């Protein structure tokens, strides 16, 4: 069952098992919020960065897993953050916008496939199938997580997972780099042999990937009793999840969507989500509405639970890319009544629906059309071409094709330079130039805003960056590591030390901030010396940062007193020695 007092946080669901580390992760979402995406790398951090990690910890967590994580989302549905952050630059290689499968349909799955390895190189898998997007939305959602391991032979059970993951690189609005595509296809092939641990009391398991082919093979929703929970519902979708007749169905949806259904039979139990409901006599004020998608079908004394991204709509089952997990258990313990119970289910979150007349909201329609237009524009081949040299660059933004015709006003901005806008004309090839851009502010993320009357919608578009200057991300890193304290914290995190904050002590004179380790500079030297043999790549990263900081008086002031001399000794030891003649 899915009791509402059992909370699951995505970060915890993605966290590797004790003794293991992340080998690879592939995730999908409909919408993505860049600020929320920053949290994902923290799930895979080998060290505990706390509930509210500092920017240095977040940055190093992203850097550490950037080449192992890929997130695919619907182009045009990357939300604009309230405040830009340097940290978002390190998300660039992970995020991949996807084109809509066909007009009127969307890329909509919300699933994560993860591979972990332990110290003995043994692999395990985790599949996280959610109804939640990668955003900060606080609606009531549902999630199902499965743990697995490599099996000896291919199991057709896994074909839907494999086919979805393998198809992702082909859906991109921008090309996925070859090495990433190879890794993704490798995981897709590997997962065909996975064996999964069944949930408690489950007797069977099935996966359903929809929208990968023109004709879907739909799940079997036939039965004598069913519960349909979905924020969005329409008549055609209800015909799919409640085939032949909806009699014996409990329908839970947003009231404004129930209002637009054709008249339902009297014995259909229709309910809505109530944020004022109480669970175990405690209010749940943080729940802001219904977003979960759950279908439970009873047949032959078995309960078939479907959890995933599909709403009860025509689009979900006729063209959208969606993913569902089906779990089969006994109907007496896990059927409709059990899930609706006040004590163990989520019945306490529901109230009876009162029939309301269908109302068309002109503003909602207007927003829908603006969002659809943003999607079509975001799917164009956008580029950002860099020219110039330090300390000042020019960036030319181009759409690569004509924008669709629209009466809306369109503007472009760099995510790193909000407030400096450039208007572009609908129906024409878009071009905009941004001058005097610093190295650390160069990036592929552009903000597209559409305004029609009083309605405004915006999205972030990751363009292809042409003539990407060398050292750009090092400049971003140097801008974040701007105090001796942050410098040493980054050093310790770079070398993989747990709880770096606790290992840093105060300088005796306080003039340069924290610089000692275990009370002595010798501790830092020992760490660097050990890294010469064990972590040469980490020292390469540190060398680039030290070189950039050492090039200016302000940068040298960031490094603790005496560190530059210490690094000179370590760096000499890194150089290969020529054999004596």
Image (cartoon, rainbow, N blue to C red):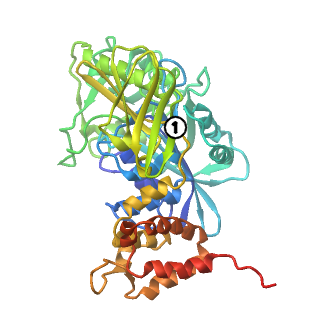
Q: Judge by depth and name the residue closer to the eye, 18 or 182.
A: 182
Q: Residues within 10 Å of mark 1 (few under 14, many from 20)?
A: many
Q: Quadrant of the C terminus?
A: bottom right
Query: Which residue is located at x 34 percent, y 62 percent?
Result: 54
The residue carrying mark 1 is 385
x%, y% of residue 212?
59, 28
Residue 455 image-quadrant placement: top left
Residue 81 position (above or below residue 546): above
x%, y% of residue 167?
62, 35
Q: Judge by depth and name the residue closer to the eye, 422 or 240.
A: 422
- Left or right: 132 as drawn, with respect to 21: left
Q: In which quarter of the image is the N terminus?
A: top left
Q: Judge by depth and name the residue closer to the eye, 292 or 246.
A: 292
Secondary element under disc 1, as helix, strand or loop, is strand
Q: Decide if residue 290 is in sight here.
A: yes
- Left or right: 29 as drawn, with respect to 486: right
x%, y% of residue 504?
36, 78
Q: Judge by depth and name the residue closer to the eye, 536 or 557.
A: 557
Residue 246 position (above or below residue 277): above
- Left or right: 400 as drawn, with respect to 341: right
Query: Which residue is located at x 46 percent, y 88 percent?
Result: 522
Residue 224 image-quadrant placement: top left
């Amino acid at each position: 069952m899915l009791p509402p007092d059992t909370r699951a946080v995505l970060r915890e669901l993605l966290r590797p098992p004790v003794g293991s580390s992340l080998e690879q992760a592939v995730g999908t979402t409909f919408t993505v919020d860049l600020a929320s995406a920053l949290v994902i790398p923290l799930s895979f951090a080998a060290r505990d960065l706390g509930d509210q990690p500092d920017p240095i910890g977040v940055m190093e967590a992203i850097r550490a897993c950037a080449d192992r994580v890929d997130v695919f989302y619907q182009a045009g549905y990357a939300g604009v953050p309230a405040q830009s952050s340097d940290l978002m630059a390190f998300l660039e290689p992970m995020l991949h916008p996807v084109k809509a499968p066909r007009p009127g349909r969307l890329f909509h799955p919300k699933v994560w496939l993860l591979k972990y390895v332990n110290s003995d190189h043994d692999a395990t898998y985790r599949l996280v199938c959610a109804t939640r997007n990668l955003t900060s939305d606080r609606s009531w959602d549902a999630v199902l997580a499965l743990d697995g391991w490599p099996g000896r032979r291919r199991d057709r059970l896994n074909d839907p997972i494999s086919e979805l993951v393998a198809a992702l690189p082909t859906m991109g609005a921008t090309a996925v780099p070859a090495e990433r595509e190879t890794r993704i296809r490798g995981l897709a092939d590997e997962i065909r042999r996975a064996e999964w641990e069944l949930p408690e009391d489950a007797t069977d398991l099935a996966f359903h990937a929809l929208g990968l082919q023109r004709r879907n093979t739909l799940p079997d929703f036939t039965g004598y009793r069913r519960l349909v929970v979905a924020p969005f519902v329409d008549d055609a979708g209800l015909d799919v999840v409640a085939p032949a007749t909806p009699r014996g169905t409990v329908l839970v949806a947003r009231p404004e969507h129930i209002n637009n259904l054709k008249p339902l039979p009297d014995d259909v139990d229709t309910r809505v989500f109530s944020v004022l409901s109480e669970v175990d006599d405690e209010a749940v004020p943080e729940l802001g509405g219904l977003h979960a998608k759950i279908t439970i079908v009873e047949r032959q004394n078995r309960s078939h639970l479907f959890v995933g991204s599909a709403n009860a709509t025509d689009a979900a089952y006729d063209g959208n890319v969606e993913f569902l997990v089906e779990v089969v258990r006994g109907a007496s313990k896990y059927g409709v009544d059990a899930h609706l119970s006040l004590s163990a289910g989520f019945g306490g979150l529901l109230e009876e629906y009162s029939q309301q007349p269908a109302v068309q909201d002109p503003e909602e329609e207007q927003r829908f059309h603006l969002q659809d237009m943003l999607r079509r524009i975001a799917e164009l081949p956008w580029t950002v071409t860099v020219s110039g040299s330090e300390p000042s660059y020019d960036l030319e933004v181009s759409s690569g094709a004509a924008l669709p015709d629209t009466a809306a006003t369109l503007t472009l901005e760099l995510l790193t330079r909000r407030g400096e806008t450039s208007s572009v004309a609908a129906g024409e090839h878009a071009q905009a130039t941004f001058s005097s851009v610093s190295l650390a502010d160069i990036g592929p993320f552009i903000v597209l805003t559409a305004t029609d009357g009083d309605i405004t919608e915006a999205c972030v578009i990751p363009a292809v960056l042409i003539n990407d200057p060398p050292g750009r991300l090092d400049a971003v890193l140097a801008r974040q590591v701007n105090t001796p304290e942050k410098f040493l914290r980054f050093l310790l995190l770079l070398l993989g030390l747990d709880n770096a904050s606790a290992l840093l002590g105060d300088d005796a004179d306080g003039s340069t901030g924290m610089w000692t380790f275990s009370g002595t500079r010798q501790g830092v030297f020992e760490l660097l010396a050990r890294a010469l043999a064990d972590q040469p790549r980490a020292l390469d990263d540190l060398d680039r940062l030290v070189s950039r900081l050492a090039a200016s008086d302000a940068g040298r002031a960031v490094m603790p007193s005496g560190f530059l001399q210490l690094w000179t000794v370590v760096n000499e030891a890194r150089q290969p020695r020529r054999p004596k003649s």
